[in-house]
Image: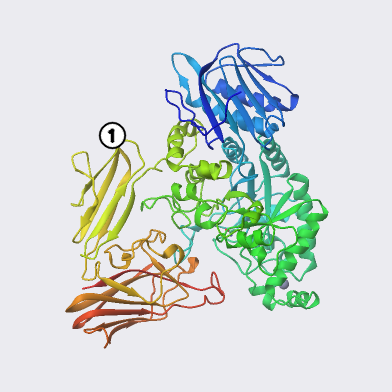
Amino acid sequence: MLAYGTFAQHSQNTVFPIIPRPASLVPSDEHFQLNKSTAIFVSRQSLQPSADLLKQAISHLGHFAVLSSENKKENVISLETDATEVPEKEGYFLRISQNKVEITGHDEAGVFYGIQSLIQLLYLNQSSSAGLQLPGCAVKDSPRFSYRGLHLDVGRNFFPVSFIRKYIDLLSFYKFNTFHWHLTEDQGWRIEIKKYPELQSVSAFRDETIIGHKKDSPHRFDGKKYGGFYTQQEVKEVVEYARSKYVTIIPEIEMPGHAMAALAAYPNLGCTGGPYKTATFWGVFDDVFCAGNDSTFHFLEDVLSEVLALFPSKYIHIGGDECPKTQWKICPKCQKRMKDEHLKDEHELQSYFIRRMEKYLNSKQREIIGWDEILEGGLSPKATVMSWRGEEGGIAAAQQKHDVIMSPESHLYLDYYQSLNPNEPIAAGGFTPLKKVYDYDPVPGELKPEEYQYIKGIQANIWSEYLYNQAQVEYMVFPRAIAVSETGWSAKTHKNYEDFLKRLRLHKIILRDKKVNFFDRFEELNFSFTTHNDGKVSVHLSSTLPQANIRYTTNGKNPGMNDKVFKNDFFVEKSTIFKAQLFGGTKPYGKVFEQSFDFHKAIGKSLTLKNKPKGNFNPKDPLALVNGITGSLRYNDGQWSGFSGENFEAVIDLGIVQNIQKLGLNILKYHWQRMWEPNVLVFYLSENGKDYKEVYRQKTFPENAVNKVRASVPLTKARFIKIEAENKGIIPKGEYGAGNKAWLMIDEIYVN
Ligand code: ACM
Ligand code: ZN
């Protein structure tokens, strides 16, 4: 018997680039040679589909194997299950030796995962002369989490069944076991419900679609009718297809919010009775299912009864997110319901809604999953919480002994930018590069060890507002989803980004073969800036790319092989356009990196803030506000300082008294991200730091983007500059995030 120690590094030319990284892998000196008489043996009929899949993969790679009902002694790949030998659910044991390849699964899923590991080895060990030689090894493997999910929103953009199959292929190849199919949205209802034909004729379509980002103002539209839905027959086939790959599909039918499309067909289910239209732009809409109207519940029960007949999954996702209470507050039916049911506020009404639907689903032996808003007003008895607005919802749910799936927007929303390159295709927002995704761990430090058991797993979400076609979905999802697969499967102590990258580089071959339009610049330049007290800003560049060399210019030209090699940090001392290019050997890799520095009198000067920037908007460089770099529209670029509900109050000490005639500040106004302009901005100057004189005041900030305030002030001798910007406070009614604290986003103060 082999010992299963730690993951061994291969020493020769053989490679074991399995993703997700197996629990243990011990290489040996043996080799298994695949040839025309290699047989695939299955110990039981139910493993036949997996054997077929393996046979297909082998022939796809230009080789050959025959299926056999006889377990030969030699030249055989045998597939069997043995729950004693492999005690962990979904686990497997893969042994490649001179005579045999053995895959033993705890269960059929385990065998399937063993086959995926074997296929990865087949792909990446093809030597031309010797045919297909598999390196000897013993792999013992099982998952960390029982829930490993990938989601897809088909409401905003609709993707054909052929793509859904490809998506399932890819996710199962990386050992995900759950596909969360987000089937209903404001902008389109995507599943056939026979009892309600207008869900097909009306709700599945919208009149037109917004062009560009929802933040763009004014909204522009394409004037083209758009839509589609999956027939029940198609859904059945997809569910069966997924089952054959050990993927459970969890359907999501959204309630009580994100219901515009359904209301367009059945306006009696809304508080006002309509008329409503399937939404044509992205956002959160006040019109939701009426919670006071019994027809709403009858409708949803009818819908779910058809959904249950199609999806055998134990869990049904009922949404529950982003449901404004605006209409419920003024709807007599909703208000009557609150009175009759002794509900103290509209959150409790939402809780009533979810509980009622949970009761129905429990009566059908199913359980609900909902987004973390289902905590508000009280969690229904058996609900599983999908924590998306951060980890707080998941933590609260686990503390209440409810199951949790972690899918925080901050790390696992793959519709967010993965590169800060300004030429990236339009995306939802943010900045979530591969490493950030990889480094996420779904068990929060705040939990007590006895609460860890409630964290059932991890899921990455892919919202499709800006994913106009399949190629774009693939571009955003891969390789980031592959990083998620490793977090979901491999032990935390077994994860290592460098090691992951080594394997991922090899997987590019597989992804290309599978015709996946993945983002292949995941090793593009990393950069950071540090501001020094002497008024210089240093640029630090790095890359994980092997044989990387970085060349740079400061003359505005794109760097080539003759330009200076970046070795140590570069110090910027004046206004400069800094450009850099990464090369792997002599080959340019990725796009040109460009950063301009706009120098002024306050660079690197002492800065005192009354309130501290918070959360994601607390720059690593404490002098980011005075470093000559302007925060970009990618608000997660590390430049912006964000003040949540609090005012911005800064004092800069220039060290000596000097002439001042220009003051400036940039403010990011993005209401759709809860980022609000201040009520008022005031600049003051002082010679002694005690007696300040107001020199400028501004109250309107019209740009729905970066507002660049540049004020000419009467020439003044001053050493101290004080800036006050008053936070909007609580986001007003009718706006995105109403009732929450507004962010006041500031970057770069200018003094000249
Ligand atoms: C969500 O992103 N609204 C769950
Ligand atoms: Zn109502």
Left or right of 691? Residue 733 is right
Q: Residue pushed farthest right?
A: 363
Color theme of the render: rainbow
In the rendered structure, the answer to whether residue 114 lies left or right of residue 84 reads: left
Q: Is residue 209 visible?
A: no
- Residue 644 visible in image: yes
Q: Which amino acid, by three-letter code, is at mark 1? A: Gly
Query: The N terminus is located in which quarter?
Result: top right
| Left or right of 407 on screen, residue 454 | right
Residue 673 in the image, given as x and y percentages of width and height: 48, 65
Q: Residue at x 61, y 30 (%)?
A: 114
Q: Nearer the viewer, residue 195 or 447?
A: 447
Which one is in front, 160 or 15? 15
**Residue under pointer 1:** 585
Quarter of image, res 538: bottom left
Residue 628: image location, x then y, percent: 26, 64
Kind of element beneath mark 1: loop
Mark 1 Cα shell of 10 Å, populated few (<14), some (14-19), many (≥20): some
Name which quarter of the figure residue 740 lies in. bottom right
Task: Identify the image quadrant of residue 738.
Answer: bottom right
Count of numbered tags: 1
Side of 195 relative to 151 (left or right): right
Ligand 1 image-quadrant field: bottom right
Q: Is residue 674 above or below residue 254?
A: below
Quarter of the C terminus within the rendering: bottom left
Q: Nearer the viewer, residue 564 or 269?
A: 564
**Position of 612 relative to 18 (above/below):** below
Q: Position of residue 356 (x, y in %)?
A: 78, 63
